[in-house]
């Protein structure tokens, strides 16, 4: 699917450039870059596109090539952070809202998931939230802003956002907000409150992997709160499903020793 998208994008690129005034040499370079992408030789495609940019082509050609380079780094070379400057070029030079949104979404995701530059992810998501009419992914952007604040340790700001989501039962991220609130309370060492939110989350969540993950966190909260019996029981219940049972066995062994020592 990704390769098909890239081929289509490059075909559109060539068609888009066909009406532009450029030399046959530049045209040949673009066609050669397309062949490199078709053959999945992305490094050579990048090298050639960069050479074309150094020739200072027209703005329309420069813009389209910048987007191609961004997509190659983002989708194929697993060097997402390098794609940022090329998406930024699109944001700065293309007025079309469609391309603005596509590029800003990629920049926000790269800064959140790969660069871990959460201030920049918040900035991009907040720009996206200002589009009129409201974009269909508005609720997702809002969730990501909250998660970004959480990742920066700004728990009060994150709490405000997740509380807002919890006041909207029809919000598509309503269930996830319980999980996020649990994490906030956990990191603030409010163990009982964290467990309370996570049990509300478990009442609604259906994904088995997420259920296992949150149950482990509940056991961890119990353990941190010296509720050793409750922690032991949950860890034990996870043995058939937890992806790394050796971790659970070590926890169980430690808890058993602590419970025995407590009784002495």
Image (cartoon, helix red, strand yellow):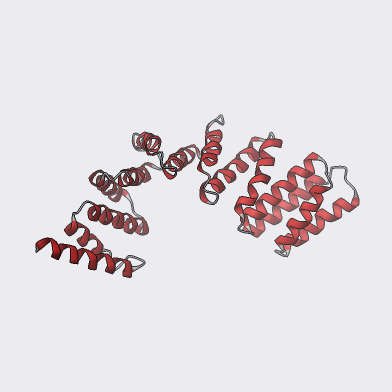
Residue ranking furthest to the right? 24
Answer with the quarter of the image where residue 252 lies: bottom left
Give residue 34's position: percent from left, percent from top. Answer: 77, 57
Is residue 108 among the parts visible in the rendering?
yes
Answer with the quarter of the image where residue 214 lies: bottom left
Give residue 119's position: percent from left, percent from top. Answer: 52, 39
Specify whether 117 is left or right of 70.
left
Specify whether 232 is left or right of 94.
left
Is residue 239 among the parts visible in the rendering?
no
Query: What is the total number of numbered labels drawn onto the structure image?
Result: 0
Give residue 106's position: percent from left, percent from top. Answer: 59, 46
Please determine whether, in this image, residue 34 is positioned above or below residue 17: below
Please determine whether, in this image, residue 211 is positioned above or below residue 91: below
Query: Looking at the image, which is closer to me, 134 or 177?
Result: 177
Specify whether 260 is left or right of 182.
left
* The N terminus sits in image quarter: bottom right
Please determine whether, in this image, residue 230 is positioned above or below residue 246: above
- The residue at the point 56 percent across, 29 percent down is 132
Give residue 10's position: percent from left, percent from top. Answer: 73, 52
* The C terminus sits in image quarter: bottom left
Residue ranking furthest to the left? 264
Specify whether 114 is left or right of 244.
right
Query: Looking at the image, which is closer to me, 98 or 42?
Result: 42
- The residue at the point 81 percent across, 45 percent down is 17
């Amino acid at each position: 699917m990704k390769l098909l998208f890239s081929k289509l994008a490059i075909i559109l690129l060539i068609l888009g450039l066909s009406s532009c005034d450029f030399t046959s040499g530049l045209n040949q370079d673009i066609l050669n870059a397309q062949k490199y992408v078709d053959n999945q030789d992305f490094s050579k495609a990048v090298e050639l596109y960069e050479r074309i940019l150094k020739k200072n082509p027209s703005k329309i050609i420069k813009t389209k090539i910048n987007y191609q380079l961004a997509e190659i780094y983002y989708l194929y070379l697993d060097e997402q952070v390098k794609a940022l400057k090329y998406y930024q070029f699109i944001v700065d030079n293309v007025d079309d809202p469609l391309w603005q949104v596509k590029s800003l979404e990629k920049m926000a995701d790269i800064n959140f998931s790969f660069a871990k530059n959460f201030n920049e992810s918040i900035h991009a998501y907040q720009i996206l939230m200002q589009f009129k009419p409201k974009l269909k992914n508005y609720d997702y952007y809002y969730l990501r802003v909250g998660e970004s604040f959480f990742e920066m340790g700004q728990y009060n700001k994150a709490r405000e956002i997740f509380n807002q989501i919890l006041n909207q039962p029809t919000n598509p991220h309503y269930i996830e907000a319980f999980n996020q609130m649990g994490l906030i309370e956990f990191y603030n060492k409010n163990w009982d409150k964290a467990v309370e939110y996570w049990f509300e989350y478990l009442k609604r969540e259906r994904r088995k992997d997420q259920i296992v993950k949150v149950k482990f966190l509940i056991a961890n909260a119990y353990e941190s709160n010296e509720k050793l019996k409750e922690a032991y029981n949950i860890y034990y219940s996870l043995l058939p499903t937890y992806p790394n049972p050796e971790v659970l066995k070590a926890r169980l062994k430690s808890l058993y020793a602590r419970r025995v020592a407590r009784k002495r």
